[in-house]
Amino acid sequence: MSQPYSKKIVGYVTCCVSALAMVTAGQISKANAASMTFSATGTNPISGGNSTALAAKAVFDDSIAGKLTLTLTNTGPGASVPSDVLTGIFWDYAGSPLTSLTLSSAKAPTVITNNVTTGTNIDLTKVGGSKVEWGFAKTTASSGLGGASGVANPVTQHYGIGTAGFGISPGLGLSGGQQLNYGIITGYDSANPAVNGGTFIKNSATFVFAGLPTGFDLTKIQNVRFQYGTALNEPSTYYIAPPPPPKKVPEPGATAALGLFAVGALRLTKKKSLVAA
């Protein structure tokens, strides 16, 4: 085999391997995504008028080693009544119990009262000095966090945060401050006196949890429930996973890499035929 021919073979192989490596790197980055988003919508039959829609979004992020960040956002229209106010979120984890998970910080970029900004970058764990406005609860009980005795629609999830207590046992950690106050709204829509006189987080708040174990798998977060109002029999919405995608087809990058590989193989075959002749 001549030296020029050997160099061409190396070139073809290098080209094909490089293309496949680029595709593989792209697939790995997608598989190791550091965040997951859960969204849900629903209706509130209590509010009526133009404010019947409920919508919320939760983004979980584990890009910081040992920590889980949750950004909770109300994406619905303005609030009319207390049951339009997003006051909690609950979820499950389909892995080993997160027994060491603790709430290390809770921040609200903007706080409003009667549509006027009354505070920025508020620490929700020390409102008014030392009052905790959003508390975190967790349990290993098979029944979940539960709620007040005989309450309708108890919390079956094992982890949750809220500004209202929801009748959940204080021993589990959830300790709402002033119940409705410091819930999350996008604004006001013909609000009643309870909403007009309240103090709320505008749009979103961010919570950081410490004690995340090694091997934590973000994709195992499931059964996400968004809670509104101050009682568990008030509206709540659930994230519903989208239907499975259609049958998988090769990604454009993979197809291109395979094409390069095929072209390289074809050229090698032709060269071999010429040499044999």
Image (cartoon, helix red, strand yellow):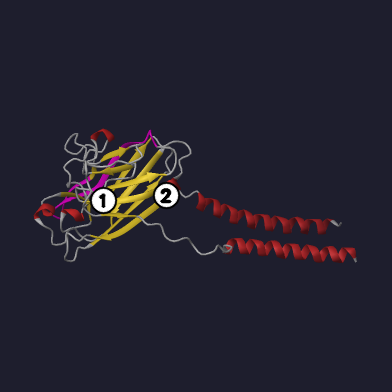
Task: Tell me which segment is drawn in magenta.
Answer: 98-120
Quadrant for the C terminus, please.
Answer: bottom right
Considering depth in this image, is 258 or 152 the residue closer to the camera? 152
Amino acid type, callout 1:
Gln
Element assignment for label 1: strand
Considering depth in this image, is 16 or 258 the residue closer to the camera? 258
Amino acid type, callout 2:
Ser
Q: Residue furthest left?
A: 193
Quadrant for the N terminus, please.
Answer: bottom right
Q: Residues within 10 Å of mark 2 (few under 14, many from 20)?
A: some
Residue 106 located within the stretch drawn in magenta:
yes
Q: Where does the image place residue 90, in percent across and percent down from the top left?
A: 31, 46
Identify the disc placed on residue 227.
1
* Left or right: 40 in relation to 124: right
Q: Where does the image place residue 266, in percent across and percent down from the top left?
A: 76, 65
In the rendered view, would you say 273 is above or below 187? below
Q: Is residue 123 visible?
A: no
* Left or right: 36 in relation to 121: right
Who's the residue at 29% across and 38% down the image? 137
Q: Residues within 10 Å of mark 1 (few under 14, many from 20)?
A: many
Q: Where does the image place residue 129, in percent across and percent down from the top left?
A: 18, 35
Disc 2 to disc 1, C-alpha distance = 22 Å
Identify the disc placed on residue 82.
none
Residue 104 located within the stretch drawn in magenta:
yes
Q: Nearer the viewer, mark 2 or mark 1?
A: 1
Do labels 2 and 1 touch, CB within 8 Å? no
> What residue does disc 2 label?
35
Element assignment for label 2: strand
Q: Disc 2 or 1, which lies upstream in sequence?
A: 2
Q: Main secondary structure of the magenta part?
A: strand
Q: Residue furthest right?
A: 277
